[in-house]
Image (tube, rainbow, N blue to C red):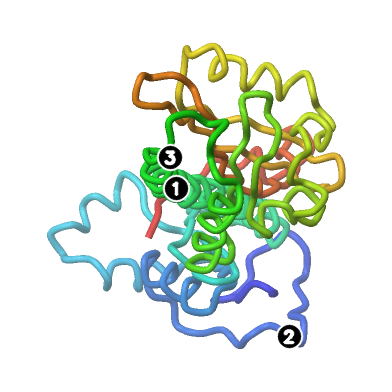
Amino acid sequence: MPPRWIGPPVTPKPYVKPADETQPIEVPFALEIARLAVRTASPVFVPQVPQRDVRRSLNPELHEFLLGGGCYSLITVPIGTDERIDGALIVVRDGPGRPYAREDVAFVSALGARISLGEARAARSSTAKDARRRLVVAIEMFLSEYEHMSTVCRPALDELLESVAAEDPECRAAVLDLELRHLCCTKAYAAQLGHDRTRVVGAGLGTLVADVADVRAGFGKVLVGELDFRTVGIRPAASASPTTLHTAMIRGADATPWCIVVVAAPVSQLPAAVVPGESPAAQVPAATATA
């Protein structure tokens, strides 16, 4: 979505307003601009902020602080996903004479995209860990009726995961034995690995990933009993999506390892890193804030 332009352009070259841009509107202060970015889910660019609007937005008792730095040029971009906008990133020029240019909007938008994807990663990780916690409780209660893992009724274990999937079809969960073979899994988990359940159940995790050595190293501390909970990154061989496995060791009443619960979460892909030497905007110092 093209950025909104607010106020007269101030650029070294003549500026021609594209047909898809909005007409200039009166400029509120930075936080109001950020709220506009959140409401419209698009960047807002103010090349030159009228100082009368900045002063009008502040209590007169605060005007003295504008002597040390104000808001002379501003870009704000929304932070969030397609489903929800959580806030906005604001960059401002706190001195006159060097306003932002239109090419700076792409730079700030790239920063906003990285923040948004970072938040998406954190949210997916939190959701996966909550699912793992619930699944551990359910599996432990189920296994408490058995004396040893070898006596566990596999169809009943399958039914347990089916009930989990019925409550949350997006739950990417599986149960592995101590050789990292899949005892059972949900449909969403198999799809995350790029297969259906008939291919995954009974298969070793190492046969389904491109980084076997990394997987064995990641599970190593769990299998030797040093850790009961571990986060392991994998690259499914049949899928282009990197995946994080949130794992938990399930133990019997005598603390003997029985099996491993796994909840998978796709890894959001971040854009390429911004290289300061290749971006003119990267040389522009800016103050930042979150609405």
- Res. 46 image quadrant: bottom right
Residue 60 locus on image (x, y percent): 16, 65
Residue mark closest to the camera, 3 vs 1: 3
Q: Residue at x 77, y 81 (%)?
A: 18
Judging by the rendered image, the residue that carries numbered circle 1 is: 135
Q: Is residue 141 above or below residue 253?
A: below
Q: Secondary structure at mark 1?
A: helix
- Sequence-wise first label, 3 or 1: 1
Q: Is residue 9 left or right of residue 31?
A: right
Reading the chain from its start, which is encountered first: label 1 or label 2? 2
At label 2, the amino acid type is Asp
In the image, which disc is placed on residue 20? 2
Which residue is painted at 77% across and 37% down in the image? 235
Left or right placement of residue 197 versus residue 135 in this view: right
Residue 247 or residue 101, whichever sits in front: 247
Please report the residue visible at 44 percent of the width from the left and 71 percent of the height from the top. Answer: 33
Identify the residue under disc 3.
Answer: 143
Rounded to the nearest whole Å, what is the CA distance between mark 3 and mark 1? 12 Å
**Is disc 2 placed on a helix, strand or loop?**
loop
